[in-house]
Amino acid sequence: MVQRIILGLLLVVGAIEIGLFIWIGKNIGFSWTFLLVIFTTVIGAWMAKRQGMQAIQLARIQIQNRDVPSDAILDGICVFIGGMLLIAPGFFTDFIGFLLLIPYTRGWFKAWLKWWFANLIRKRTTTIFKKWR
């Protein structure tokens, strides 16, 4: 079931990317389209590194204060996925990647991740490890 969903997403996202490349290439030309893809990759990698370092620093502070770094971990997950999407060439994936890197819009994804993790735990489809003392 999960494999079919992933395959379907890959096909749909690939088709969207090809369509956007053709449409943007026709409107601004091949050279500008190519430069735009390179530009979004460079800016995205820079933003992902910056946001990722902030998430790591926040997690360290929370751990030092003996708090569970749940928000920092969710930020890290979103930044990692956003960075990977920005490195992949394409305009649709860049759009989603930038949404994951902007702190305000990242909140939507973090809320969804919390809901998803809560459902996994509620359905008992995950294993939670407890610290042994």
Image: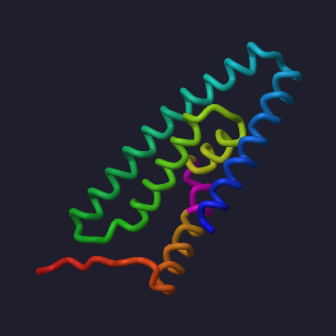
Q: Residue at x 68, y 34 (%)?
A: 90
Determine if the magenta segment contains residue 47: no
Q: Residue at x 48, y 40 (%)?
A: 48
Q: Quadrant of the C terminus?
A: bottom left
| Total residue callouts | 0
Q: Residue at x 52, y 42 (%)?
A: 84
Q: What percent of the width, then of the height, locates residue 16? A: 78, 42
Judged left or right of residue 131, residue 4 is: right
Judged left or right of residue 86, residue 120 is: left
Determine if the magenta segment contains residue 106: yes
Q: What percent of the width, then of the height, locates residue 53? A: 37, 44
Q: What percent of the width, then of the height, locates residue 6? A: 63, 56
Q: Is residue 29 above or below residue 128?
A: above
Judged left or right of residue 59, residue 75 is: right
Q: Quadrant of the N terminus?
A: bottom right
Dominant secondary structure (helix, strand or loop) of the stretch shown in magenta: helix
Q: Where, by quadrant of the figure, is residue 31 drawn?
A: top right
Q: What percent of the width, then of the height, locates residue 112? A: 59, 68
Judged left or right of residue 42, residue 32 is: right
Q: Residue furthest top?
A: 31
Toward the viewer: 23 or 64? Answer: 23
Q: Residue at x 55, y 34 (%)?
A: 87
Q: Is residue 10 above or below residue 121?
A: above
The magenta-colored residue range is 102-109
Colouring style? rainbow
Toward the viewer: 44 or 85? Answer: 85
